[in-house]
Amino acid sequence: MSELIKVGMADYKVGRNPNSLISYGLGSCVGIAMYDPVTKIGGLAHIMLPDSTQARSNENPAKFADTALPLMLDEMIKLGAAKSRITAKIAGGAQMFTFANATDIMKVGERNTGAVKSALKKLDVRITAEDTGGNYGRTVELKLDTGIYRIKTIDKGEKEL
């Protein structure tokens, strides 16, 4: 019997077939799905901020792209995934609010997406698909039996990566 495992904001979870991992309400946050298609082991992270070194409080490593992704990858490997087979799909990183004089610091979604891509490159995990940017929220689900990353939006419909 499969279980739908919820991943909260500033959190990550790992699991295996036949379960699914789901995270609701990604705005400027980014949802990162990693998956090993042979063992059907996957992970889903919901990161809020790009860089733990810039934060006043970095007590929760799952909050940041640079710290959450290495931890999630390590947990997947401990479950039996092979690093050489793991790929990633990413979604989110929206610009939810418009500011008249938006500086780069206010473009959190864009910064989050860039940090996720940098962290994955550093980990040598290839991104195979992405649905990022825009000005709308997303809910993401990683189906561990197939590796399909389902993205649902309120007014843009649903898609599978």
Image: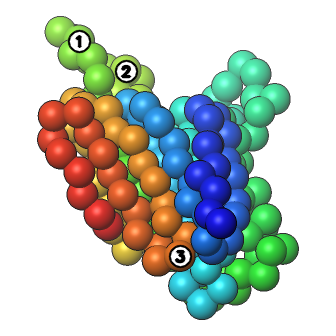
Please give the name of the residue rendered at 23% of the width and 33% of the height, measured from the top-left corner. Answer: 154
Rate crowding at label 3 as few (under 14), some (14 to 19) or many (20 or more) other CA atoms within 10 Å: some
Where is the C terminus found, in terms of image quarters? bottom left
**46 vs 155, nearest the viewer:** 155
Give x and y (percent) for residue 2: 62, 63
The disc, 2 or 3, on the residue closer to the chain's N-terminal end is: 2
Q: Identify the mark nearer the N-term, 2 or 1.
A: 1
Left or right of 50, for residue 123: right
Left or right, 43 with reference to 139? right
The kind of residue on which mark 1 rests is Phe
- What residue lies at 51% left-to-right and 55% top-to-bottom? 32
Task: Point out residue 132 in the picture as x, y percentages from the top left corner.
Answer: 30, 48
Decide which of 94, 161 is in the foreground and name it.
161
Q: Position of residue 118 (x, y in %)?
A: 50, 58
| Cα distance between the residues tagged 3 and 1 | 42 Å
* Image position of 132 with respect to 29: above or below: below
| Disc nearer the start of the sequence (3/1) | 1
Q: Amino acid at mark 3?
A: Asp
Which residue is disc 2 drawn over?
A: 106
Q: What residue do we see at 59% from left, 32% from top?
A: 9
Q: Are marks 2 and 1 in contact (CB under 8 Å)?
A: yes
Name the mark nearer the viewer: 2 or 3: 3
Residue bearing the label numbered 3: 145
Q: Residue at x 73, y 70 (%)?
A: 76
Q: Quadrant of the N terminus?
A: bottom right
Whole-angstrom CA distance, mark 2 to mark 3, is 38 Å
Amino acid under disc 2: Met
Label 1: which secondary element: loop
Q: Mark 1 = which residue?
A: 99
Q: Is residue 74 visible?
A: yes
Q: Is residue 43 visible?
A: no
